[in-house]
Amino acid sequence: MAKPSRTLVLLKPDALQRGLAGTLIARMEQRGLKIIGMKLVQIDRALAARHYTAHVGKPFYPGLVEFITASPVIAIALQGENAVDAARQLMGATDPLKAAPGTVRGDFGLAIGRNLIHGSDSPEAAERELALYFKPEELVDWPRDTERWITES
Ligand code: DAT
Ligand code: MG
């Protein structure tokens, strides 16, 4: 049985502008991932630089910052067995044209710079990124009554 882990998902500005936030949140709920935090955030350039620190200096970085700061995102903290991997799988490959059908990017995206959703790529990244968006007390480890019907723990 895998240890419960946490991950950060962002519904990016294109998801909100296109009215897809509810649809994308529903996919996470349907998968069985538990929401332990959620908020609307207007990312500024400083937060964008901290979030995307690994990409500073890459050719696409200026456009990425313009995009992620253009209008609000919804930051979501998820918890569950293999939450990092499950969220990444649900998102699909970075380039929507390479993302499998059935994934968020494969079903709703066309362009790599408009790929709708972010998910942490490792448990270590998840803890670093969660701290950018949430105070510890904003993450609620609530008991879910359906847990035994979703996981074997
Ligand atoms: P992911 O979001 O799948 O973790 P990443 O961390 O490699 O992908 O890149 C972060 C974001 O930067 C990605 O969601 C979209 C943008 N991006 C990555 N590679 C790009 C590229 N070659 N051209 C344009 N945008 C790119
Ligand atoms: Mg990434």
Image (tube, rainbow, N blue to C red):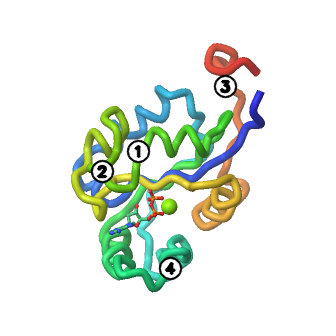
Q: Tag 3: Cα neighbours inside 10 Å, few (<14), some, or many (≥20)?
A: few
Q: Amino acid at mark 4?
A: Ala
User: Are the residues at dot 1 and dot 2 in contact (C-beta closer than 8 Å)?
Assistant: yes
Residues 6 and 60: in front is 60
Residue furthest to the front: 98
Does residue 98 appear in this view?
yes
Q: How many angstroms separate mark 4 from mark 3 (CA)?
A: 35 Å
Q: How many angstroms separate mark 4 from mark 2 (CA)?
A: 23 Å
Residue visible at 49% across and 55% down?
75
Q: How many angstroms separate mark 3 from mark 2 (CA)?
A: 33 Å
Which residue bears the numbered disc 1? 92
Residue 49: percent from left, percent from top: 50, 79
Residue 130: percent from left, percent from top: 63, 59
Comparing marks 1 and 4, which lies closer to the viewer? 1
Residues 53 and 30: in front is 53
Which residue bears the numbered disc 3? 144
